[in-house]
Image (cartoon, helix red, strand yellow):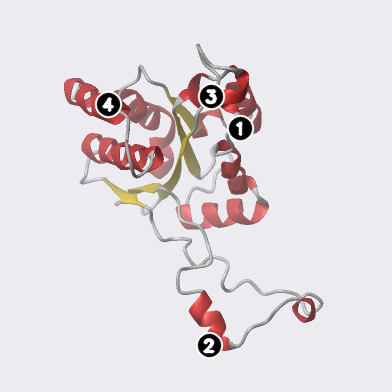
Amino acid sequence: MAGNALRRRDNWQRPSGPGGKAGIAEKNLITALRENLDPDVYKVKDHPKDFKHLYETVELSEDTLPQIYCPGDAAMKNAQKMGWGITPDFSIENKKTGKKLFGEIKRQDGWVEGKDPSAGRGNAHERLCKLFTPGLLKKYREVSGIDTSEILPFWIVFEGDITRDPKRNREIAFWFDNYDKNYFMWRPQMTDFDLVRHFNQYLRQYLD
């Protein structure tokens, strides 16, 4: 398994070219999980739709409704065709228990050798903060089946120079605080084995 992991990781590390680096990262991370987790036990989904329509049924207060635009039913239904919600990058489901761990992949530049501190100015990592909001955290726990306070119901995998950026590493560590097992810095020298080992060691038990 280690040899295959190294070869896949080598391909994943190459420049993505047209189409965007993030898409390449997502595809190969999902492949790494599917090839290294027991398919009889785990189902790895690419962009699961569990939360695609999450916000469509939110009821607003009677004070709010008169102050906002309220289209007719037909217009509203048409506007919601693509889904008013969020779509995680991946999920890992234990087929036996039905519990799921939802995941996000965040690729970002960062301050490393040969670059200025401004190289770490991206904000892809900041977009994960929505998962810490009371509403989403509650819904993620409900859908995932992970209701213990020992762990969060999501896993963030960082990729790119941000994984070695001295500022961003401190910033992210502060955000997650004691939930440091809920994110993983998939650094350039690492392989698929390192990624899967983190899942097996720290997160798998919560899907049992």
Q: Amino acid at mark 1?
A: Phe
Report the residue at 27% width, 35% height from top.
32
Q: Amino acid at mark 3?
A: Gly
- The correct choice, above or below, for 118 with respect to 24 in the image is above
Q: Please name the residue that numbered disc 3 is placed on.
A: 110
Residue 38 placement (x, y as % from top left): 22, 39
Q: CA distance from mark 4 to mark 2?
A: 48 Å
In which quadrant of the rendered view does residue 30 lie? Answer: top left
Give yes or no for contact between labels 1 and 4 (Cβ–Cβ under 8 Å).
no
- The correct choice, above or below, for 130 with respect to 67 in the image is above
Residue 177 is left or right of residue 146, and the answer is right
Residue 155 placement (x, y as % from top left): 47, 39
Q: Nearer the viewer, mark 1 or mark 4?
A: 4
Q: Please name the residue that numbered disc 2 is placed on.
A: 74
Residue furthest to the top in view is 113
Name the mark on residue 9: 4
Q: Earlier in the sequence, mark 4 or mark 3?
A: 4
